[in-house]
Image (cartoon, coloured by chain):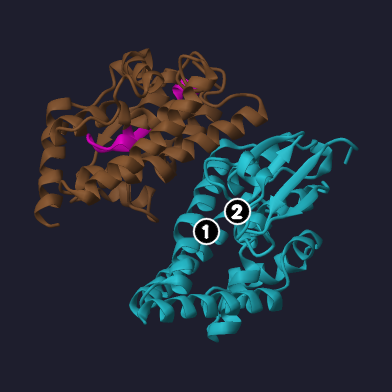
Chain colours: A brown, B cyan
């Protein structure tokens, strides 16, 4: 069966990094799909039907069957379009386990302090969040440097790169809005280089959110948090 | 299991995440060396095997560490000989995705809310945790109906990833029931789950891996006493 013939729909929202993770995965596999933009303040009946548990985006619908949760969707895409495009997860079980482990590191350990740093007004609390974020970035820097590859698991975009991916454009935006650096080239040479490489990678470069609009959105978010501190 | 397969599990008996990892080889008929860790005094082996999180469980396979319970379970399933028993994950991509979805739900929603009901700092926080926990259980009743397709397990005819994920929590959930007096898996509200709890508990693999409920109750009471003492001390 030619999987390209099966209908693929992606329900998403233009600013969600999780939606982009799925878009990049689909791009790696060369899958054609219909994209449906959701208004999260007025969710469509279709979205609520396809993801009744969380009512969130992204949701991938393949051949009428929905898949939710971006990490689950990415692995699903890798399974279904096994022979197409690049491998998203490594073949070897131990390497696969390592990829899954590092993919979890981003939401569990790295994103929280970065978000805290971004949504806290300047002062001790923000400095502490900045330091905490730097500590986790150091762990990632070591892992990337140790591997010695272009991307985390090899020479093409894989699961861990996808997990970290949005931070490649989000961190520089946060830095600009706050006026403080986080990923300084001298301190994190591998990560810094990776960020540029990721944004230029074929599955990613033509599938990025509208940056100016995103920046405006982030500015408004920061303003809100700082005012309501 | 072939000699020299060299499986070592660094764990701590009270941890449901450690139990989760014990269940996987139990169901696949694999044996492993159990290394009991003193969480208050972590060993060099643990710290060097899991430098990022410094937590149990850690599986060492031929000396190579694998961390995070759901990652470990999938690793064991992928690596183990097909002759050792049915796979914990279906070969169908959509069914696998559904299983992974519910495994994530169990940790993100059920475990998180249950922990809040236990460790919440205020009575409000605790009761909110309890409320969310019951909501999660109700959702899981629907999940079981959907996934089991009339068979006995989330994995269908045989135990799967979701059964292992939820099953690992059973001793603690039963302990909670004993301590609070409230039934978490109510046979009237969640009949499928209540039946599943009995069925799962009867499995040899479950009996081997799950800690004794009375022992868990004792441990939980001790922990609560410690927390209360610490809170009282900080108020003085």
**Mark 1 highlights which residue?**
B143
Q: What secondary structure is found at the residue carrying circle 1? A: helix
**Mark 2 highlights which residue?**
B162
Residue A92 location, quadrant: top right
Q: Residue at x 73, y 48 (%)?
A: B9
Q: Residue at x 28, y 41 (%)?
A: A130
| Disc number for residue A37 | none
Looking at the rendered structure, the number of numbered marks drawn on it comes to 2
Give whichever of B69, A45 is nearer the camera.
Answer: B69
Q: Residue at x 36, y 18 (%)?
A: A198
Residue B144 location, quadrant: bottom right
Locate residue A128, reporting x and y percent: 29, 47
- Visible in this render: residue B138? no
Give whichever of A51, A6 is nearer the camera.
Answer: A51
Q: Give the magenta part as a residue range.
A: A3-19
Q: Quick check: marks 2 and 1 in contact, CB under 8 Å?
A: yes
Locate residue A170, reporting x and y percent: 25, 31
Locate residue A39, reporting x and y percent: 19, 44
**How far is disc 2 from disc 1 in space, using C-alphas?**
10 Å
Residue A137 location, quadrant: top left
């Amino acid at each position: 069966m030619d999987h390209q013939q099966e209908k693929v729909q992606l329900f998403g929202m233009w600013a969600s990094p999780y939606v982009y993770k799925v878009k990049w995965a689909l791009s790696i596999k060369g899958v054609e799909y219909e994209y449906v933009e959701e208004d999260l303040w007025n969710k469509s009946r279709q979205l609520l039907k396809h993801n009744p548990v969380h009512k969130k985006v992204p949701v991938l619908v393949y051949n009428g069957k929905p898949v939710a949760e971006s990490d689950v969707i990415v692995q699903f895409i890798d399974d279904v379009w096994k022979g197409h495009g690049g491998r998203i997860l490594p073949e070897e079980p131990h390497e696969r386990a390592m990829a899954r482990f590092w993919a979890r590191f981003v939401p569990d350990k790295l994103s929280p302090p970065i978000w805290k740093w971004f949504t806290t007004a300047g002062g001790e609390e923000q400095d502490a969040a900045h330091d905490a974020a730097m500590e986790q970035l150091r762990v990632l820097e070591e892992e990337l440097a140790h591997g010695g590859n272009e991307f985390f698991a090899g020479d093409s975009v894989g699961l861990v790169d996808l997990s970290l991916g949005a931070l490649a454009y989000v961190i520089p935006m946060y830095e600009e809005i706050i006026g403080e650096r986080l990923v300084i080239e001298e301190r994190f040479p591998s990560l810094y280089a990776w960020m540029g490489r990721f944004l230029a990678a074929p599955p990613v470069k033509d599938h990025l959110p509208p940056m100016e609009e995103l920046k405006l959105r982030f500015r408004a978010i920061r303003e809100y948090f700082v005012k309501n501190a | 299991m072939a000699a020299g397969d060299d499986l070592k599990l660094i764990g701590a008996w009270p941890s449901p995440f450690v139990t989760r990892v014990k269940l996987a080889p139990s169901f696949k008929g694999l044996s492993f060396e159990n290394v009991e860790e003193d969480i208050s005094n972590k060993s060099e082996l643990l710290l060097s095997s899991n430098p990022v999180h410094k937590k149990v469980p850690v599986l060492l396979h031929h000396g190579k560490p694998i961390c995070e319970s759901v990652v470990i379970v999938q690793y064991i399933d992928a690596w183990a000989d097909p002759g050792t028993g049915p796979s914990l994950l279906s070969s169908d991509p959509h069914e696998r995705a559904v299983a992974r979805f519910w495994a994530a739900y169990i940790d993100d929603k059920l475990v998180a809310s249950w922990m809040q009901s236990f460790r919440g700092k205020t009575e409000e926080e605790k009761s909110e945790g309890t409320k969310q926990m019951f909501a999660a259980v109700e959702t899981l009743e629907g999940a079981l109906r959907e996934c089991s397709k009339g068979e006995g397990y989330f994995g269908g005819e045989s135990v799967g990833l979701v059964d292992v994920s939820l099953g690992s929590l059973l001793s603690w959930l039963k302990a909670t029931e004993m301590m609070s007096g409230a039934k978490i898996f109510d046979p009237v509200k969640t009949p499928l789950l209540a039946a599943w709890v009995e069925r799962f508990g009867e499995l040899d693999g479950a009996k081997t891996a799950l800690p004794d409920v009375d022992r868990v109750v004792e441990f939980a009471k001790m922990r609560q006493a410690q927390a209360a003492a610490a809170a009282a001390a900080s108020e003085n």
